[in-house]
Every structure is written in structure tokens, then in C-alpha cells.
Image (tube, rainbow, N blue to C red):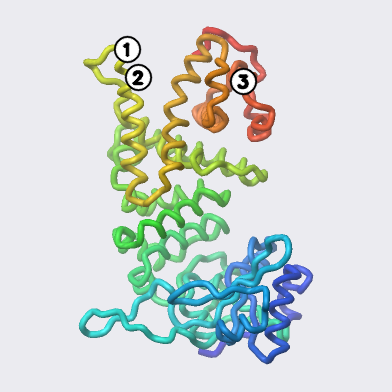
Amino acid sequence: MNPITIPRSEHPISRSMIDEEALKVLYRLHRHGFLSCLVGGSVRDLLLGKAPKDFDVATNAHPHEIHALFKNSRIIGRRFRLVHVFFKGGKVVEVSTFRSHSEFEETLTDDGQILKTDSFGTPEEDALRRDITINGLFYNIADFSIIDYVGGIADLQKKVIRTIGDPDEKFKQDPVRMIRVIRHAARTGFHIEEKTYQAILNHREEIRKCSPSRVRDELLRELKEGASTSSLRLMIETGLIFSLFPDLRRALGDDAISGKKNRDFLLSLFSLLDRLMKAGHIIPESTLLACFVSPFIRALPSEHPFLGKREQSHYRTQTIRWAVHHLLNPFSFPKGAKEMTILILTAQSNLRYSIQKGVVPKRFRIKKYFKEAVLFFGIEAEAAGRKIPQVIRRAVPSDLLPWWPKEFRSRRKFNQNEP
């Protein structure tokens, strides 16, 4: 395939937009006679006028040749070796050798054995093994041109998310790509090309074959990057979320009692979280998980018809514990994150009791989970259309208050009879 080469005069990327450390890596490789390119998301983001989080470099130099050029580097990985080049201030530039296969693609022999082959390849092969076209662009430091083997420039202009190659084959090789397609559509606001979208519908059940830890990491990226509302909406629309979490159908499915109401509530929760994250606030992972699990818990019975008042509290706690473990255990979430999620959710009844009494006891305020419990209370109250009572605001440590935008905060005086 002949690439499209876009000269510097015809694209907006300048060296002033690239991190100094990444430029040092690009130029040193170039000076030693290697092809040296910025790749993937950084090129995409620069073309979209966004500031990339990371600048990744790809080259035809092999890992040991890269390592020899940079004393401040380390080779990582077993099957697919990468080089991390370290700089002052904690900056890391990741350098990869052009590859012919994705890390998660397996080549099988006739008897079903994994064939161990040299995976190094050409720039074209490296572009073709990537997931979507807008991530398959290279910025060549030699002449500041953009090299496009996959039609990524055209799709950027048309605002389309499209797999590189046949989407059916891509998703069979690595089903996690379906999550990535949805995430990039959510981040950019682009629409998913019809054939790619249909392939997600056809292969969504394949996601269950993937490593639980990989799915967990991709899911957390969906929730943490400020575009979770659009991601979750697309995951619900395609049914991919129900392939990952079959039991969520009882809370969010079309046939569920209050299914639409619970879906709207979930999206409202994450809309508020997105606003906080876009404003620069770091939301604890356990708070994200509490928001994710909350609609599922709302769909479960909150009381047992044959238990007394004291036993009901224990029943509620056990229901929350079961729900968290039931949804999250299959994906190897850390025990600490799950336990903190449970504490946040079970603390909500104590917060409501404090509202009724008009005071938050000190023994409750010093709990390690109190700040996150109050943060979740505030987010859930706003998502449900309730105001945050004064007694809760007074109990919130000052370093937590900035996490709630001003419009989230109630100016009403605390009413002891307020529910």
C-alpha cells in the first residue's frame, strides 16, 4: 500500500507543540540513522488541536539499539519489548520498534500451538496492526511530514471512528478493541462507521474471552478520562456492557423494572463525575466504582419483609457487599478498592441518619472513608435532583469542598425534617 505523505506546509503540527523530551528522543534516533516517528494518539490529538497526555515514539531501531543510545532507559516487556526513556521530573517517553503484530494477536500452528515469531516489522505493518485509522498516523521527524497508510487523515476530516482492516477480524483477534472503539468515539464525539458498529453488535460476546485484568484496565480508562457518560451510553446502546456484566440487565435492561430510570440515573452520575474530572479534580477509584455499582443496588430489594428494624440494616449491608463482589470479582479488582467501595455505599444510611438528627458525629467524621462517602452522597444527591443539606456541608473538610462545583452546593438552611 502506498502511503499518503502530507508535507509540513499542509498540516498544523509544529515542533513547538511536542514535549522537549520526546523531541530529544526523536532527534537522537534520527541522528544515528534510524527512522524516528511520533505515533498513535499523540499525532491524532495534535491534529485535533488537543494537548496529548503522552508522546510515544516508534522506530526501526531494535530495543537493544535504542537502549544503547539512551543511558537513562530500560527495556521492559517479555514478548513485545519496549524501551522506556526516563527524564528528570518523572517524564517517561515510550519507544517501540515497528511491529507486524499486535501484542494480543496470536499466530497458531495447524495443531493449535502458539507460534513464536519475530514480531518486528515495517512502518506499514506497524500502522496496519493498530486498532483504528485515526490512531495509525506517523509524524516523521526527518522532514516533519505526516505518513498515513490507513486513511486516518480522511477519517479525521469526516469525524469517523473506523477499524483498520476488517472489523470482524480485528475484534476476533482482540475483542478488547471494541471497548477502545467506543472510548475513542466518546472522547472525540465522532460517529462509529456502520461496518465497525455492526461488528461490535456481532462480536460483543467475545469480550468474555479476554483477560479479566485487561478488561478491568480498559473499563477504568472509560470511567476516568472525562468522557465516561458517552462511553457508557454507547456500551449500553451496543449491549457490550451486558456482555461484560450480564446481571446489569436486571437494573439497566429494556425489560428491567425502572430500567430507563436506572440508565438515566447512571448517566447522570457520570455526567457529574465527568464535569469534576474535566475541571481537574481527581476522583478516587472507589468513588467511581460506587457510582458504577449504585444503579445495580437500586434494582435489588432494599428490605426483607420478615426482618425487624435492626436486622434490616444488616440485610442492607450484606446486599451491598454481595452486589459489589458479584459485579467486580470477575475482573480482579483489588481487594482494597472493593472494600472501600462497600464502606462508601454502606455509609450512606449513616449520612441520612445524621441529616435527620442535624449533626454528624465526630466518630463518623474521622473514619477513613468519610470524605469519599460524603463525595458520593453529594454526587448521588445532585444526580437524583436533591440538594446537599447544610449539616453535610458543615461536616465536609475544607479540602473536599472544592470537589463540588459551586452550583452543586445547597444555600438552603438545614431543615431537621428534611428527608
Q: What amino acid is labelled 3 in the image?
A: Ala
Above or below residue 386? Residue 7 is: below
Q: Position of residue 362 (x, y in %)?
A: 57, 17
Residue 196 in the figure: left or right of residue 361: left
The reply to whether discs 2 and 1 touch (Cβ–Cβ < 8 Å) is yes
User: What residue do we see at 64% from left, 19% from top?
Assistant: 394
Q: Secondary structure at mark 3?
A: helix
Give the CA separation, mark 3 to mark 1.
27 Å
Quadrant assignment, res 30: bottom right
Confirm whether residue 238 shows in the render: yes
Residue 125 in the figure: left or right of residue 53: left
Q: Residues within 10 Å of mark 2 (few under 14, many from 20)?
A: some
Question: Which is more N-terminal, label 3 or label 2?
Answer: 2
Q: Which residue is mark 1?
A: 309
User: What residue do we see at 47% from left, 19% from top?
Assistant: 350
The reply to whether discs 2 and 3 touch (Cβ–Cβ < 8 Å) is no
The reply to whether discs 3 and 1 touch (Cβ–Cβ < 8 Å) is no
Give the CA separation, mark 2 to mark 3.
23 Å
Q: Which residue is mark 2?
A: 313
Q: Secondary structure at mark 1?
A: helix
Q: Which residue is mark 3?
A: 395
Q: What amino acid is labelled 2 in the image?
A: Ser
Above or below residue 280? Residue 221 is: below
Question: Which is more N-terminal, label 1 or label 3?
Answer: 1
Q: What amino acid is labelled 1 in the image?
A: Lys
Q: Position of residue 189 (x, y in %)?
A: 56, 56
Q: Position of residue 369 (x, y in %)?
A: 52, 31
- The residue sitting at the bottom extreme is 33
Confirm whether residue 7 shows in the render: no
Give the CA separation, mark 2 to mark 1.
7 Å
